[in-house]
Structures are given as structure tokens and as C-alpha cells.
Image (cartoon, coloured by chain):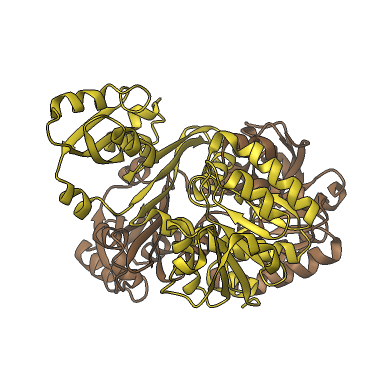
Chain colours: A brown, B yellow
Amino acid sequence: MCAHIKVGIVGYGNLGKGVVSAINQCPDIDLVGIFTRRSPESIQIQESKAKVIHISQAAEYSNEIDVMILCGGSATDLPHQGPEFAQMFNTVDSYDTHAKIPEYFKSVDEAAQRSGKISIISVGWDPGLFSINRLMAEAILPNGENYTFWGKGVSQGHSDAVRRIEGVEDAVQYTVPIEDAVEKVRSGENPELSTAQKHLRICYVVVKEGYNKLEIEEKIKTMPNYFAEYDTEVNFISSEELKQYHSRLPHGGFVIRGGTTGIDSKQVIEFSLNLDSNPEFTSSVLVAYARAAYRLNKEGQTGAKSVFDIAPAYLSPKSAEDLRKGLL
Amino acid sequence: MCAHIKVGIVGYGNLGKGVVSAINQCPDIDLVGIFTRRSPESIQIQESKAKVIHISQAAEYSNEIDVMILCGGSATDLPHQGPEFAQMFNTVDSYDTHAKIPEYFKSVDEAAQRSGKISIISVGWDPGLFSINRLMAEAILPNGENYTFWGKGVSQGHSDAVRRIEGVEDAVQYTVPIEDAVEKVRSGENPELSTAQKHLRICYVVVKEGYNKLEIEEKIKTMPNYFAEYDTEVNFISSEELKQYHSRLPHGGFVIRGGTTGIDSKQVIEFSLNLDSNPEFTSSVLVAYARAAYRLNKEGQTGAKSVFDIAPAYLSPKSAEDLRKGLL
């Protein structure tokens, strides 16, 4: 068992709450404080005795906190919080705007190199565990093809797009992998598949009084980029039904690589997740990587890292001997 | 793309042949020589121009070979070859006697520390990729349970046990995961399951003339340790059928962890393999880890390592920038 690791959380939304729960399952990690932009008195934490502190006071805790877990969003929070906190703390974050990762990595790396801290960026499941599986499967089976399927899970962006249609009161959109496509990939056939050929979209929509459901369905199904290219199913339900059956945030998906070796041996590697709670799972991954950030920095490593740079042993509280004996 | 890596192979059985094929898929790796205990002239290599060299001359190649891939067996070859070759070369091996890993690690570590080389032991899929998934899933979901299923695949030990029965001419035994058990685990129920409750055993047996099939079936099904505790199916077939349908070496399996987070969110992580050729796949894993051994030793690391100690990026020929851009 390694030394107790003192952790702070920045941001107390779904992800931050998940981190509190995840830390409660780790006897080797102590939660020191939760840093928020809101008024600290307005936040009640049931599951932890950790202090709630205004984010402007974070710098005062630089000697008390080993790793800061950044739970802000990728669109507006992390682009400045990432480099800012890397100047004071070891950090872990779940930055997930795939296209901007190189740019984000660079800005965090400069800050962390200067401060002598370590920052593990883009931790979670995609980017994160799915990325690791894409990399390893490709390295092991160079002669092959990677496939990533998402779902069944709620897509926030697509749900928002439906909500913006006039006459829609509320909506939830699920991205669902097409079973036939998954089976083809699993068989090692390596078919050519667009994102639309891999996924269908299922919407649950609450309509305001006086609006025509058929028209709304048509607007959804023909919306460019979001739905037009996809097989889309639209279901109209009541506001109560939406709350009762569609307020959780399940997600998951598959990374599958089919490849060939030797003369013509088909080899298929698959990694999959089936998650009742997307934010709670992402939080659990963040906490495991906080352990890695702490240890790697103790060993003298600095700068930005991604999950690609972290050896598995750093994620576990067990000693190298115990791991080899019990899990190898 | 990293510098070309010069590799040697020790042992030219199924695994060694698979390594030759795997290297042919890697433009960054060159095969220098295959080292054998047999007379080198007796071995013809179709797929490579690499030299075949007697194993007694290996030491002369210590400056020409960056990594030696040890393809001997765990029972009798690796316990002495592992430490022997670690005195002269960076090595990678697939040592798979789980119970003796700590002892083997120690003997290889001592040799590799002395020589300043690195040795990655127990590389393959179990131990290997399955081990990594057991470790990571446990670190991410501490409140949960790991399940490993093997198959459908040929078990050499069980096939041999059937062959030793009087009157049996030849036999192949498949270990097969029980679908019901897999489904229960996938649902996140976390049932208690013994190895026998997770797997059934299917035998294809060729009987010599004049022997009673019913008696042989009874002997198989009641054989302690190997079959008595299991649901076992025995099929009698002809020698020709055995050759035609059961001479490949498929394998695979699943590592599944079901865990809970938050109040009661079920989260399931699954890694699975479906392999036409068990030895060719293991060889492909060995070659990817040879890349890691070379690079880590270049960075100054020495001693024995396991897959737990290797960050994913070291397995890929791509640069860190390309990996972050394309796969994260």
C-alpha cells in the first residue's frame, strides 16, 4: 500500500460528485477540499467531510494537496483551468475535445514543465480506456482495422439539438450501436462502415401543447449533421415518463480490432463498457490516474502526459510484488 | 517512426514461427537470426532471409541484436534460458506458469540488473493482456469482482491427459466458456462461480481398435482435477476427422469486471479475444513488447519488468504526437 494521497477537486457538477464517491472507495486517497466558483456555503456535501472552498483560494493549498482533479467541462473550463492549475498542482483532467487535444496538451505541458508538476490530460473512457485499446490493438495487430462503437448512451449534443426545435419541451437522445454492424466487425470481416452505418439514434421527445408531432419528427429526422445521415427513431412521451425512465446517464460502447496474422488467421480484440452512470465511471478512472500522477511526480517526472504514457502498475494501490503474484 | 530494431529469436516451434510472421508485418523491426538447439541446416525458413544459427553461438551476436525474443516453453526451457539470455541481451518471453512467476521474475531480474539489460517476462495474453485488464479494471472499480473465462480453445494439458488413457490413439480437448455464466457476469450480477461453473470441456477422441468407447468415456469424465468437477462432453471421431477439423489452435476468452459506483450504479468492463491462432497471436504480442524493451533500455531502464510496468506508448511505432493526434 502506498502513502496516503491528498486530493482536491475543482468543480462540483456530475463529475465532481462522482469523484467524491470514487475516493470513498479508495482507502489510500484522502479528499482535502472541493474548489468551486459558487459560494462555498451554498454547497452541502453528504458523502464526505471535505471542506468546500472558493476556487480563488486554491493557491493557498498548493502544499496540502498532492493532486488536483479538474472536473470542469472541455468547452470553456479546462482550456484555461488546465494550464492555470498545472502551474501549482499535479493535475488530472478529462479533456475530451478530440480535435483540440494537441493544442491543449501543449499549453498544459508548458505550465507543468515550468512548475515541475505532472498533468495527465484526457483521462476517462473516450478519450482514455478506449484510446489505450485502440493503440495496443493496432500495435499488436498492425495488419487490421480499428472500430469504435458508442452506446447505448445519452448524447448531450444531440439531445440539445432536439430541444432547440420549436415546440419541443424536453428531449433525450440515445446513440445505439447497430447490432448487425457489431456482429460483422466481431466476426473479423473488417467491413467498411461510416459512423452512420455503425449507429442509430433514438429520441424520446416531450412536445408542447398545440404543436404537430409529425412535423417535429420530420424536422428531427432531416436535421443535417445530427440526424439526416442516420437511421433515426422518434418516440413521443410525456414529461413524467421522460423524468422516470430517461434521467440517468448510461453509456458504454466497444473498441474492436480485427486483424490477420500468419497466412490468414483472423484475430479479434474487443474492449467494451456497459455503464449505468457515465459521469461516475469517468470519475473512477480519474481517481485511479490521480494515483499515477502522484507517484510519477514523486519519481521526478514532470510535464503533460496522456494515458498512453502511464504504465498500468501506477493505477493500483497494490505493490509490484502483489500485482505480479495476484493478477499477472 | 523509431529506429530499426534488430531482433533475434530463440527456439523455432509454433511461437518462433509466429514471431517470424509478426516481424514481417513490422517495417521498423528486422529479424537478424533464429537460434536453435537443432542442427541449423535442418531448418528451412520460407518467410524470412534471417540466418539460422546454433544456440551455442548466441553470445557472439550480443552486439548485433537489440532484443532477443525467447520462444521456448515455460516448463523446461525458460527457467534456465530466461536468466541465461538476460546476461547478454534485452529479452522478451511468454513465461506462463502463473504460480512460479515471482520466482522466475527474481532470477531474471538478478541477471538483467547485472548486465544492464531489460527483460520483459510473461508477455502474451494470459499472462499478458488479460493481466493488464484485471489490474486496470480492479484499480478503476475497487468495489467489484474480476472474472476470467478461457476459450473456446484447445487446452494442451487436458488433451494430453486424454491421450494418456489406454486405448486412446489421439485426442483434442476444448475448454468452452458456459454462455449462461458469461451472461450473468456481463449483467453485473457478480455471481460466485468456480472455474468448473464457468467452463465446460469438450473432447474429440480417436479410439484404437478393440477398445470400448463407453469405458473410455467413463474414464475421461471421472478423471480427478482434469474432468471430474466439470461438465464434460466426449465425442468419438475418426483420425481423419481429427486432423481435418481439429488441428488448428484457436483460443480466446474474456476478462470481465462488474463493479458499483455511487449509490448503486452497475458498471461493467469487458476485454475479450477471439483467436484463430493462439501461438500467432501470442507472437504478435511478444513483438510489440520487443519494441518496448528496446526503447526502455535505451532510456536507461534495466532489470526484469512485466506488462504492468510498460506504458502503452512504448508498444507502438508511432511518435507520441501522432498517437495523441490519431488515437487518443
Residue B143 place in picture, x, y as percent: 54, 32
Kindly identify the residue that appears in the image at 58 percent across and 44 percent down. Answer: A284
The part of the image, by quadrant, that contains residue A97 is bottom right
Residue A285 place in picture, x, y as percent: 58, 48
Residue A172 place in picture, x, y as percent: 37, 55
Eyeballing the image, is B63 above or below A68? Answer: below
In this rendered view, identify the residue nearer to me: B29 or A246.
Answer: B29
In this rendered view, identify the residue nearer to me: A277 or B45.
Answer: B45
- How many numbered callouts? 0
Eyeballing the image, is A309 above or below B143? Answer: below
Kindly identify the residue that appears in the image at 51 percent across and 73 percent down. Answer: B26
The part of the image, by quadrant, that contains residue A87 is bottom right
In this rendered view, identify the residue nearer to me: B130 or A63.
Answer: B130
Residue A184 place in picture, x, y as percent: 26, 62
Is residue A171 rendered to the left or right of residue A279?
left
Instruction: Tell me if I can see residue A8 in this picture.
Output: yes
Kindly identify the residue that appears in the image at 34 percent across and 37 percent down. Answer: B160
Image quadrant in which the N terminus of chain A is located:
top right
Image quadrant in which the C terminus of chain A is located:
top right
In this rendered view, identify the residue nearer to me: B156 or A175.
Answer: B156
The part of the image, by quadrant, that contains residue B192 is top left
Instruction: Tell me if I can see residue A306 in this picture.
Output: no
Is residue A107 rendered to the left or right of residue B53?
right
